[in-house]
Amino acid sequence: MTRPPLRSLMVWGASSGAGKSLLTTALCRWAAQQGMNVAPFKAQNMSNNARVVPGLDGGFGEIGTAQYLQALAARVLPTVDMNPVLLKPERDTASQVVVQGRVDAALTRLPWRERSAALAVAARQSFDRLAGTHDLILIEGAGSPAEINLAPQDYVNLGTARWAREAGRFAALLVADIDRGGAFAHLYGTWALLPDDLKPTLAGFVFNKFRGDAALLAPGPEQLQALTGVPLLGVLPMRRDHGLPDEDGVFMPASPAASRGPRVAIVAWPHISNLDEFQPLTQAARLAWARSVAEVEGADWIILPGSKQVSGDLAWLRAQGLDAAIVAHAKAGRPVLGICGGLQMLGQSLADPDGVDGEPFEHQPGLGLLPLATHYAAPKRLRAGPVGFAPRLGPADGPPGPWQDLAGLPWPGYEIRCGRTTATQAHALPALFDAEGAPVGWCGGPAHNVMGIATHGLCEDAGILRALLGQQVRTLDQSLDGLADLVDNHLGAATLRALLEA
């Protein structure tokens, strides 16, 4: 049976944060609902929010969270080809370079312009593999396609568009954040700066994050079309409760539905990573992103999240006086949860003689709340799979701790870490086990109220949140279906079919 010619639709943005990820995710689910064989693609992403997916060699690799969620929206298995280049910021002027799922140390050391040609080759390989197995590719751009200073090296927007055009039918959308103001100028200016060969591929404009009376936009859309020849295809309303994390990791406020939930302080240190996993928690708790002692005082829970540089964030924690506040909270018998880097900080010591986590050091004390030690070493551990809590999360002869309702529960988890954490005392109480039965989490504290786990994804599981907080939250599938409804209602099924169908 002959496969139909490839179709590709690209979502460009007039700026970062315009809504490219959300619109691409919504289109993935809408297409999947119509029975289309669709896959997402973003040539290069920059984020410390990443997920573990099958790699090219039978092992695991990491991609940006946005493309992971887009794959689930498309109802296909996420793979490293969907985000072949991931840049993970380590400081203002440097990022770790992940190519097709694995860290590339040599490319990490090169300046951006010098490494772009090699990255473009890897991205093209991944695009071609996806094109060989899917009928429709939904492509997310990065930033803006009109960054004329970067155009010669821009394989992410301009290069990808040309690859897709060569491979089959190609069109693009351009989305702007109208809530910022100046959206008509953003759209017109971006169109004006597009290369001449790509201007004809622009099928339509989309306004995102609109609040108010859409009738007040007239006659702007008509005037914009007269200037560019490109129609405004739809206006998406401001939707704060869509249920998905922001790609750039902006701290998320609690949902109004969580106004009666417990107050949870998540420590927002400078190198925070994988904070996207807390998005479902906004539906079940009153979140505070804590950077000071005052912001953790009175919290029911404290969460120490992941960190891209644990030693640096631990030093920052001490400089703010938050270390003493967290220890006092734990000694008062209130829950403290550490995840990945947060787990490592809860232990007694850290060692990084090779500088894998940052600057080399032989010994740094942790918070001392769990009898654990962490040693950093390459390579990075990447793993995805089921994990399960111990049958009891507290002493057999004492009152149950705050985690007891999690006892025995399995859930899907993933690991992205260089730190190897081990118990330093025989009485350390394992709390969480991987699929091979090895401990990846421990309990402790005066009332077994302190727990550290090496695995991400705990707060994304609806069953876990229900057991832990007694709150029912939306499932990921419900949120993805809601996004499909959003584009169906505001762009229209006829417009979507014209864009996506052969």
Image: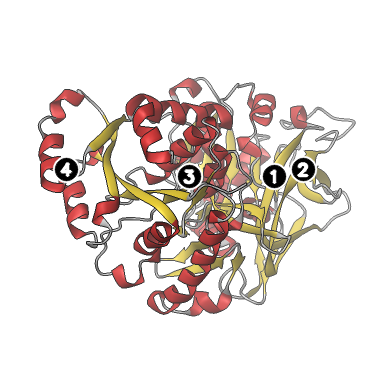
Question: Mark 4 belongs to which amino acid?
Answer: Phe
Where, by quadrant of the figure, is residue 328 drawn? top right
Nearest to the eye among marks 4 and 3: give it.
4
| Quadrant in the rendering for residue 73 | top right
Q: CA distance from mark 4 to mark 2?
A: 49 Å
Viewer can see residue 112: yes
For badge 1, the amino acid type reads: Gly
Looking at the image, is mark 2 or mark 1 earlier in the sequence?
Answer: 2
Q: Is residue 34 above or below residue 119?
A: above
Instruction: Find disc 3 in the rendering and name its residue.
Output: 293
Q: Estimate the x, y position of residue 19 in percent, counting from the top left.
A: 36, 42
Q: Would you call the spot at circle 2 few (<14 residues within 10 Å), some (14-19), or many (20 or more)?
A: many
Identify the residue at horizontal 68%, vertical 31% (top origin): 464
Q: CA distance from mark 1 to mark 4?
A: 43 Å
What residue is drawn where x is 43% and y is 54%?
Answer: 168
Disc sitting over residue 184 in the figure = 4
